[in-house]
Image: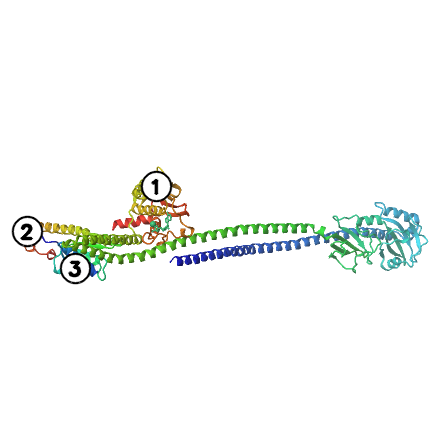
Amino acid sequence: MEGREAIHTSTHDAHIEELRERRKHYYARFFRRFALLIIAFFLVPLFLVGWGINTYYTKFATARMTNSFHALVDNHRKIIELFLGERSSKLHLTAHTHSRDYLAQVSNLAHVFEMINLEQSSITDLGVIDEHGRHLAYIGPYDLMDKNYTNAFWFKEVMKKGLYISDMFMGFRKIPHFIMAVTRTENGETWILRATINTEVFRSLVENVTIGKTGEVYLLNQQGIFQTSPRFRGKIMEKSPFPVESFHEGTRIRILDADDQKHIPRQIVAQTWLKEPHWMLVVKQDYSEAFSDVNHANRATLVFLLLSAIATLIVTVIITKHMVAVIRRRDAEADQLSKQLMQAGKLASVGELSAGVAHEINNPLAIILTERQILLDLVGQTPSLDEEFKKELVESLSQVDVQVQRCKRITHNLLRFSRRTTSVIETVNLNEFLREVIELVEREAKTSGITFIPELEEGLPPLLTDPSQLQQVFLNLITNAVDAHDGKPYGSIHISTRSDDENEGVEVVFADTGSGISQKNLEKVFDPFFTTKPVGKGTGLGLSICYSIIKRLGGDVSVQSELDKGTVFTIFLPYSPPSDLQESMNEELEV
Amino acid sequence: MIGARILLVDDEVVFTKNMAKLLTNRGYVVTPVNSGDSAIRELEENDFDVVVLDLKMPGMDGITTLKEIKKLGLFTETLILTGHGAIDTALEATKLGAYDYLTKPCEIDELVAKIEGAWEKKDDAQKDDIQEKIKKVVESPSSAFSLFGKKKSKK
Ligand SMILES: Nc1ncnc2c1ncn2[C@@H]1O[C@H](COP(=O)(O)OP(=O)(O)O)[C@@H](O)[C@H]1O
Ligand SMILES: [Mg+2]
């Protein structure tokens, strides 16, 4: 029996251990899954939105940037074309309002020259050339009267088109400049009015434009030669590394990637061709500067996304932890409940069984008693019996009675344990009640060297409870405490009461200095039929009866113990019993 | 003086036999039967002062038997024997008109005391009844015919 019990317990413990381990894994898995799920649900949309905003904004900003570049280039082209147009129309006007002969006179030419430069020195020299390429008159800082231009490129061009604007060239003066020439045909003879444009004014028009820190504006001719000095990397009349496209209408905008050595960063380039001359206006800016706004916004978005992600993570962890804690608590509560249910179930089934057994045993006991009585009657009716024999017989018959009474006590205990007792609820002064109970047992316990030490709180509120059942509980606990001192010469039993207004009840504590209960047995003391006492002495029913009575009265009982030191039973009793008990009581009274 | 006439009803044959012997030793006139049915039959045929009735019996149980007995409308008092756990049923039985109950196993002296009580009660009730009837006869002699008949025959 002992062995089987032990094996049973150890497998039981192993089972619980395994369950606990499984639970732990389950919680961990739940935590991971739930966290991942939340992260997926929060972060994926977050990043999608972030990505969407970013893409959309980049597109939008790029378009705006491009447009503004477009406008910039167009503006500059207009300014340059206006400048050139103004110069050419002045020449045109002069040629067509004055005859060749008039202008061929140097004094007249000088006068015109002055008039043209009146407001602003826009040309540096002015010459009249006949159709053979010879100077008829010249005003300017150089002596060019002997020059013959028959073979000059510009001469041929202007004779052909009527207006010519040259590219920049060094010429005889060794400084970059360009010329403008118009023709007039007078009496079948064509002559040319030619002027050198003041390049300083022209160049400042282009070169002085600055855009941001990295922006530049310059002009290229069709061969890719700088017509004005760029702000960075290059000079007028030098060849530009920038590949020149053939003439096209309108404005083009390109992004140039950084070169391999990273000397030149990524740039945005806008280009447009002038109509006359065919020069290309280029506006350039480092991409990073041009798009600094976009980049700024992108960085802000990124930071925002990052912060959101971090916040989500933190919230996720907190929520998930909380959820797991809630589940864990639920599980613990469920465990507690199932433990109690199991205990209740055990008590119920044992109760049913023992009630049946007790009933069956009562009948033979009744018969044994009648048989004994018959024998006693016979003895009384037979006076001839030997006195010695008579005495022996009566003695042994009285022993039969003692044993039958013992059986009766056992069966009555069993039945009391199982039956639904009719509760009689009364007002009970607990302290007084306990003093009576102690008085009842004190005399018996004195012989075994045990003293009772009551510590009863004064002014304890009266309880509404069943005194006869309560007495049974107290007697059982005291009996156990006395039994626990078996083999000890002396000991004590503390009995204290304390009101617990918060839980609306009273706490009664029975603390003894007895043998204590081992950790292994502590879980089982409330089980029916669990006893460590020798056969015939313990039934193992005392504490399970206590348990069911206290539960029925709406209270609670717990035990703490230390081996060889003693045991403490703590009982909680409510000020008034649960309503269902009161109801069932009323019903019984009505019947 | 002759002791009370007792009808002993219990399904345990040995118990009724022993009890009958013990009660006879103490001067009672005992008829043991072992079922509710035979108890009713016995009561219909013979007069008894006290019925000692076990509650737990196969076939017709104690409570049903008690109800049947009550239907007979006799002066006979009923004493209930019961197991300890069945006090609820015993209380129910006293509400149904049983004189008292005893838990099994019980001492013979206890049983005898209760029997005496039941008998006395039965006798008193019968005497009261007779006096009443005499009064009635004195007041209206026409009812004299039913004077010594059974209680049952009045109905
Ligand atoms: N105060 C106590 N000190 C030590 N052991 C106790 C005490 N109360 C109960 N026990 C242990 O619990 C077991 C069960 O007690 P109980 O249910 O009253 O049955 P029984 O007293 O008939 O053995 C006892 O056999 C004993 O081992
Ligand atoms: Mg005990």
In screen coordinates, is A323 left or right of A266?
left
Dot 3 falls on a residue whose secondary structure is: strand
For the residues labelled 3 and 1, the Cα–Cα distance comes to: 54 Å
The disc numbered 2 marks a residue on which chain?
B
Q: Position of residue A409 (x, y in %)?
A: 28, 52
In screen coordinates, is A414 left or right of B22?
right
Question: Marks 1 and 2: in contact by CB < 8 Å?
Answer: no
Amino acid carrying mark 3 in the image? Pro
User: Label 1, on which residue?
Assistant: A452
Same chain, labels 3 and 2: yes
Q: Give the residue displayed 54% in from the left and 51% down from the top.
A: A317
Q: Nearer the viewer, residue B148 or A300?
A: B148
The numbered mark at residue A267 is none
Q: Nearer the viewer, residue A286 or A369?
A: A369
Amino acid carrying mark 2 in the image? Val
User: Label 2, on which residue?
Assistant: B137
Amino acid carrying mark 1 in the image? Phe
| Res. B92 visible in picture | no
User: Label 3, on which residue?
Assistant: B32
Q: Nearer the viewer, mark 2 or mark 1?
A: 1
Q: Position of residue A381 (x, y in %)?
A: 14, 54
Snapshot quadrant of residue A169: bottom right
Dot 1 falls on a residue whose secondary structure is: strand
